[in-house]
Amino acid sequence: MSELTLTVMRLGFLAVLWLFVIVAVQVIRSDLFGTRVTQRGSRRDAGRQQQAARQAPPQQRQQTGGGRRGRNTPTKLVVTEGTLTGTTVALQGQTITLGRAHDSTIVLDDDYASSRHARIYPDRDGQWIVEDLGSTNGTYLDRTRLTTPTPISLGAPIRIGKTVIELRK
Amino acid sequence: MSSTTNPSTQHTSTIGAIGAPSRRNTELALLVFAVVIPVFAYANVGLALDGQVPAGLLSYGLGLGLLAGVGHLAVRKFAPYADPLLLPLATLLNGLGLVAIWRLDQSELLQSIQQAGTAAPRQLMYTAMGIALFIGVLIFLKDHRVLQRYTYISMVGALFLLLLPLVPGLGKNIYGAKIWIQVGSFSIQPGEFAKIVLAIFFAGYLMVKRDALALASRRFMGLYLPRGRDLGPILVVWMVSILILVFETDLGTSLLFFGMFVIMLYVATERTSWIVFGLLMSAVGAVGVASFEPHIQQRVDAWLDPMREYTLSREGVLGHSEQAMQALWAFGSGGTLGTGWGQGHSELIRFAANSDFILATFGEELGLAGVMALLLLYALIVERGVRTALAARDPFGKLLAIGLSGAFALQVFVVAGGVMGLIPLTGMTMPFLAYGGSSVIANWALIGILLRISDTARRPAPAPAANPDAEMTQVVRP
């Protein structure tokens, strides 16, 4: 085998190996540069959405990574029924715990609530999730009892015993 | 990203992995690529050594391709939304490892000193067993949360596996480290499997205890100091890893388990103070043990002055090894672009040239460029694992994924760092690359679990079915 062939093969192999690495990185490009949001609507619509995103505060935009949620991100949690009616909690990316335990974010004074009843937290792309922490009487999103962590939409009532809370803009 | 967040549709709106494409075809394309590269390398070795394409090229290529293909079909069937990169990356590393082992098999020097010469076919068999276990995990582990039930059984199982090498008659002391057991003609490294079982225990345990560990703390000099009684678990794990270090004289295993616990503790509690504590404790432990354990001491001496170690060994002083220096020479002779497949002399490392020191072969024959690519492949596996943890919706899955990928990363660091002379050398195997049944099989199982978690995380949520029980037990408001 000639020296030249071997050199070509040697360098060729390294090139192929690196090509694989580059292709693999291309596959996960979205991890590095954020998800490209493709709109179902017209291109014009998409442009408008992006403009809206650009106007959104930078911190929020980073969290949402797209135009759509820039406008729909809830900013506060409001108690609408129960003894705590009218209480609001600003949503700043922290986990909110609900229950009768004293260290909960919202301390529920409610016979139907467990000491660590539920928690509400943002997932990695800013969507708020409610999770029942194994409570006795359950947590209801609308009229459905939660069994798994479930995304919350704006204005959907979350019911814990006599207390109802919802997320608002 | 295009679901409706319309309040009137209520809970049926799902965000996150919505409509996420399954990406199985991407995986298939990458997998083909990942099989072609080792075949190319194999032909390359044959051409360099004998001037002709090796006879086994077709069967070897088909064998690897078949294994990868079966793995891919299993993923397609049982975990259709799993991560597209993990399987190709693992296949490529495994294939390259097979080529390097086969290349070392060809060396007459190695053939003359041990049973080498048959290592590559056996490694291929281990790979087949590993892929079988991988498929088994995908088939039988429908939901990784099932593992949560076995939290404390896992603890007992992991301790059992870790202590197994110490059982007289069963344990085997190979060159100073007691981390093998002998069953029949096989020697098994239980620590490789303990890694996975322990991750399950830590994930289950920390998921329950994380609030207590995270919240109850005082602030002192910018650090959250945990309460004394919350230090219990970390102290216990520390003690166990010190015991491993003392009785099995294996720095790597000990470092791996303690490091994995600290990583998972940090992720579970979001408290930097645990990392500070962990680093302090591992430093104290390592220095303490090294001061009286001769085997560890010798490893540290070899690390500080490999040349002296080399000369001592040349002079025939027992208990010294030339390998650390030889590995460094191998890297040096490789240079930037390497000597090319089959044209290095890493077989001079002799013992463990195809297991613990396999990275030296890559360093010599592929050079800096090749080793960097390999390390990037490992980094990508770890990145996919961490990404899986970020995407997972349940805390147990998050912790398990981070624990497994953390352990994988630590293992790569410990081995690569040891061979390259960054940290004291320790007897562990490079995942997938190195020769060794336990390591290959355990790491395929690890990839299987990661794929299962990522499948659960990326799978579009099914429309929640109305639960009749829930309606009946609903609390009636007065």
Image (cartoon, coloured by chain):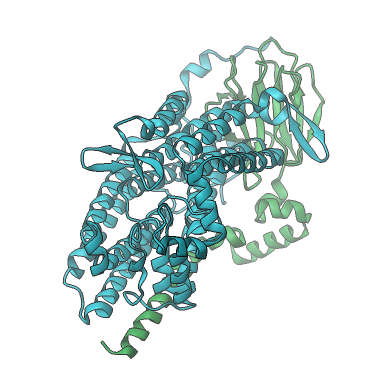
Chain B: drawing colour: cyan
In the image, what residue occupies the spot 31% across and 65% down? B35
| Residue nearest the viewer, comparing A165 with A135 | A135
Q: Nearer the viewer, residue B98 or A158?
A: B98
Residue B402 can be seen in this image: yes
Label total for image: 0
Q: Residue A90 at x, y = what percent?
A: 79, 36
State which quarter of the image contains the C terminus of chain A. top right
**Which chain appears green?**
A
Residue A142 in view, yes or no = no
In the rendered image of this protein, does residue B277 appear above or below residue B309?
Answer: above
Where does the image place residue B379, in percent across and percent down from the top left?
A: 51, 58
The residue at 67%/29% (across/down) is B213
Is A18 placed above or below A110 here?
Answer: below
Q: Whole-percent x and y of residue A165?
A: 71, 27
| In the displayed structure image, the side of residue B342 where residue B253 appears, left or right | right
Quadrant housing residue A52 = bottom right
Identify which residue, B432 or B364, lies in the foreground: B364
**Quick one: quadrant of the N terminus of chain A?**
bottom left
Q: x, y percentage for residue B64?
A: 26, 60
